[in-house]
Image (cartoon, rainbow, N blue to C red):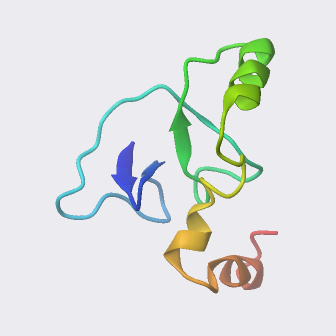
Amino acid sequence: MFQRAGMWLTAGEWGGPKAGETVEKRQVRYRTVGDMSCTGAVDSDADTIEKVIAEIAASRLTERGATRADDKMSEAAMEDRKREGYF
């Protein structure tokens, strides 16, 4: 994982860390519909459905708004994905 714009992201074919962004191993989960190419991860030790539900119930951040990386990359990122056949 590497951190950018306050989110934990995973390197892949769509991009990776830039100069100054360090990579580290973390236990995370993805909090919204999507995948690691367009969604930031959050630190989590939840390893069961029950723990995930408890974590969500205790959170003060929205599941979608805090981690949708496309929204922080550009206003047109989601539309660009649609044109590229992501959906």
Q: Residue at x 70, y 80 (%)?
A: 84
In the rendered view, would you say 71 is above or below 35? below
Please identify the quadrant where the N terminus is shown: top left
Q: Residue at x 42, y 52 (%)?
A: 11
86 lies left or right of 39? right
Q: Position of residue 56 (x, y in %)?
A: 73, 31
Q: Residue at x 77, y 79 (%)?
A: 82
In the rendered view, would you say 70 is above or below 13? below
Q: Position of residue 16 (x, y in %)?
A: 37, 59
60 lies left or right of 57? left
Q: Position of residue 69 (x, y in %)?
A: 56, 62
Q: Residue at x 77, y 76 (%)?
A: 85
Of the pair 62 and 15, the residue shown nearer to us: 62
In the rendered view, would you say 63 is above or below 38? above
Please identify the quadrant where the C terminus is shown: bottom right
Of the pair 34 and 59, the residue shown nearer to us: 59
In the rendered view, would you say 59 is above or below 63? above
Of the pair 18 and 61, the residue shown nearer to us: 61
Q: Quadrant of residue 29?
A: top right
Residue at the outermost left position: 20
